[in-house]
């Protein structure tokens, strides 16, 4: 357990950041799951831009690596493009 005042504050800040990062990550994963379940191409294309934006924000915040973000976006775009 922390003894110094600054260390206690750092622990509080880290806990806050961790909760926020978990929220953004989980929300994005749910959005990706919902996008994968869409069957019509028009709806999927609309949803793709929103999900790509969410993924970019995760990478910008450092929650996921930028290459992972690129891979996710690539796979999703490929999936949407092959829809009939």
Image (cartoon, rainbow, N blue to C red):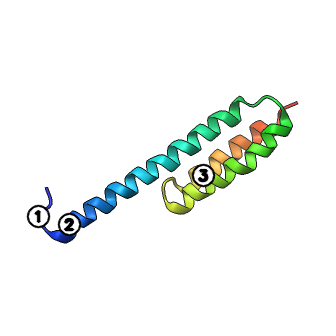
Rendered-image quadrant of the N terminus: bottom left
Nearest-to-viewer mark from 3 and 1: 1
Question: Residue at label 3?
Answer: 69
* Gap between marks 3 and 1 measured at Cα: 38 Å
Which element carries disc 3, helix, strand or loop?
Answer: helix
Which element carries disc 2, helix, strand or loop?
Answer: helix
Question: Residue at label 1?
Answer: 3
Residue shown at the point (71%, 41%) measured from the top left: 76
**The quadrant where residue 59 appears:** bottom right
Spot the residue most to the left: 3
Which element carries disc 1, helix, strand or loop?
Answer: loop
Residue shown at the point (63%, 34%) measured from the top left: 33
Classify 10 Å Cα crowding around label 1: few (below 14), some (14-19), many (20 and above): few
Classify 10 Å Cα crowding around label 2: few (below 14), some (14-19), many (20 and above): few
Q: Are marks 2 and 1 in contact (CB under 8 Å)?
A: yes
Residue shown at the point (20%, 66%) measured from the top left: 7
Q: Are marks 2 and 3 in contact (CB under 8 Å)?
A: no
Rendered-image quadrant of the C terminus: top right
Question: Residue at label 2?
Answer: 7
Q: Could you tell which of marks 3 and 1 lies nearer the N-terminus?
A: 1
Q: What is the count of numbered marks?
A: 3
Closer to the camera in the image, 40 or 82: 40
* Gap between marks 2 and 1 measured at Cα: 7 Å
Classify 10 Å Cα crowding around label 3: few (below 14), some (14-19), many (20 and above): some
Residue shown at the point (48%, 47%) measured from the top left: 23
Left or right: 28 with respect to 12? Answer: right
Q: Could you tell which of marks 2 and 3 lies nearer the N-terminus?
A: 2
Nearest-to-viewer mark from 2 and 3: 2
Instruction: Point out residue 80 in the picture as x, y percentages from the top left corner.
Output: 78, 38
Left or right: 57 with respect to 18? Answer: right
């Amino acid at each position: 357990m922390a003894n110094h005042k600054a260390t206690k504050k750092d622990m509080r800040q880290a806990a806050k950041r961790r909760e926020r990062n978990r929220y953004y990550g989980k929300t994005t994963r749910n959005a990706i799951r919902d996008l994968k379940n869409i069957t019509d191409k028009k709806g999927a294309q609309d949803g793709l831009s929103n999900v790509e934006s969410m993924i970019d924000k995760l990478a910008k915040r450092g929650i996921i690596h930028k290459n992972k973000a690129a891979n996710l976006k690539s796979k999703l775009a490929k999936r949407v493009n092959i829809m009939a």
